[in-house]
Amino acid sequence: MSFSENPTSGTDEFIKGLWRENPVFVQVLGMCPVLAVSNTARNALAMGLATMFVLVMSNLVVSSVRRWIPKQVRIATFILIIATFVTVVDYVIAAISLELYRALGAFISLIVVNCVILGRAEAFASKNTIGRSVLDGLGMGVGFVFALLCLGAVREIFGSGTLFGVQLFHDGFQGWVMMILPSGGFFTLAAWLLFFNWLKKRKEAREVTPKLELVGQAKRGVA
Amino acid sequence: MSGPQAAVQTAAPRVWHMYRAMVGIGILCGLLIVGVFEVTKPIIMANKAEYLQESIFKVLPDARSSETFRVDGDSGFTKLEGEATAGEPLVYAGYDDVGHLVGLAMEAAGMGYQDVIRVLYGYSYDKDAVIGIRVLESKETPGLGDKIETDPAFLENFVRLDVSLNADASGLANEIVAVKTGEKQNAWEIDGITGATISSVAIANLLNKSTSFWVPRLRAKLDDFERTE
């Protein structure tokens, strides 16, 4: 896994989280909320936004205090900062909507141990400037929201025939219950990973077509 | 706390820096949490109160206003003044436009498939029946057990679920039971949900337990809830 530490443009810090280093589909981090809270698109969106907020804020704080944190206590300090913002999110969600708060349940508190956040704090924010770290957090956050929405939308459509609570099919639709259960989360995640890897392979194959031809010729030559 | 101690031995000159980082950030984080808590607390309390109020009107569809009563020893029920103690059993009385008592709402809780299910249900003394139910808290399996909140056929059970008393008014004439889907024959039976038997039975059990406790007591003291003015 390559965490870009070489100087890159600000937009690149943002874009890489969306696609090239997408936290879910490429780095495969933070699987617990991805599988557990993606049973409906609405839950997925709320969870994604909550995680994104924590990610951006913790990246911001970690990068701004990075000079004063000795190496030996950095993980403890990062966790302290992350836990603070998770607690803030917990109260804010409860204040915004009790229904949503109940739907997300224990998973809000579990954002603390979401390895995407600690991973970005450790691998990026502790070594980069504030601006870059915020962009990185935003990019990773949007990538996380995107991934959760991909799963949530598919699972909700197949599982209950709705999207964001809006009925998509006529009344005769029989929900595919397995999609809403945890096993459906694994299958959907696997399908998405397969799809994105296929896309990546195809793109790579196109980019290196000339080289491949040479390789092919070489192989034929050897054979 | 073996971490800091180990660090003391290996990197003694930096101890002050470690304390500065951890304690300083700890204090700032603590202040932030306290600030947010203070700001959101009244909003969260208001949300909870509003949700309860809305739930009372949902389980007592004819009610236009409500009041909260507490159990006053053995003598009956008195209007709640001020704050209730946590976990105290409360009865919410619903009144129509002219202040006439239309029904009473109570909370009930029981073990479901995953965790405790808490519901609010409305009792109508004219109909001798449970006339509405709303799940306040449940962690039932999404897509299966949570149909107790959404399945229209299941909720149909609680439009008029018979809870009439036995001859000496000491308990229910018929226990509330859950039956298999489509086999409901009597007004005190609950038609279960296919694929969510445990959750359906849990609802039947918690309602049975709660109504056999409350209904005899409420019927004996109905006058306590009538508005006097």
Image: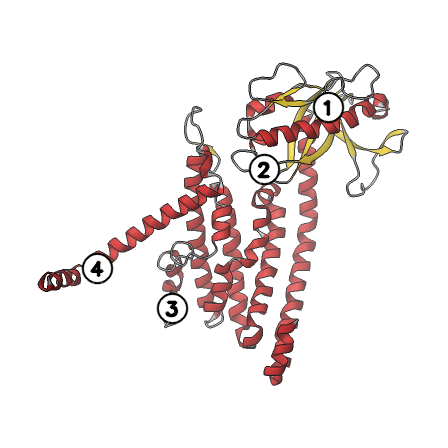
Q: Name the residue under label 2.
A: B140
Marks 3 and 4 sit apart, C-alpha to C-alpha, by 21 Å
Circle nearer the viewer, 2 or 4: 2
Marks 1 and 2 sit apart, C-alpha to C-alpha, by 25 Å
Marks 1 and 4 sit apart, C-alpha to C-alpha, by 71 Å
Q: Residue A207 carries which label?
A: 4
Marks 3 and 1 sit apart, C-alpha to C-alpha, by 64 Å
Q: What element carries label 2?
A: loop
Q: What residue type is labelled 2?
A: Glu
Q: Measuring 59% from the left and 82% from the top, which residue is drawn there? A: B10
* For residue A97, side relative to residue A196 (left or right): right
Binning the other alpha carbons within 10 Å of mark 3 as few (below 14), some (14 to 19) or many (20 upward) gives few
- Determine whether B2 is above or below A138 in the image: below
Q: Which mark is residue B200?
A: none
Is residue B65 something that shows in the picture? no
Please report, as a chain letter, where disc 3 is located.
A
User: Marks 3 and 4: CB-CB under 8 Å?
Assistant: no
Binning the other alpha carbons within 10 Å of mark 1 as few (below 14), some (14 to 19) or many (20 upward) gives many
User: Marks 2 and 4: CB-CB under 8 Å?
Assistant: no
Q: What element carries label 3?
A: loop
Q: Name the residue under label 1.
A: B123
Is residue A72 something that shows in the picture? yes
Q: Mark 3 points at which residue?
A: A4
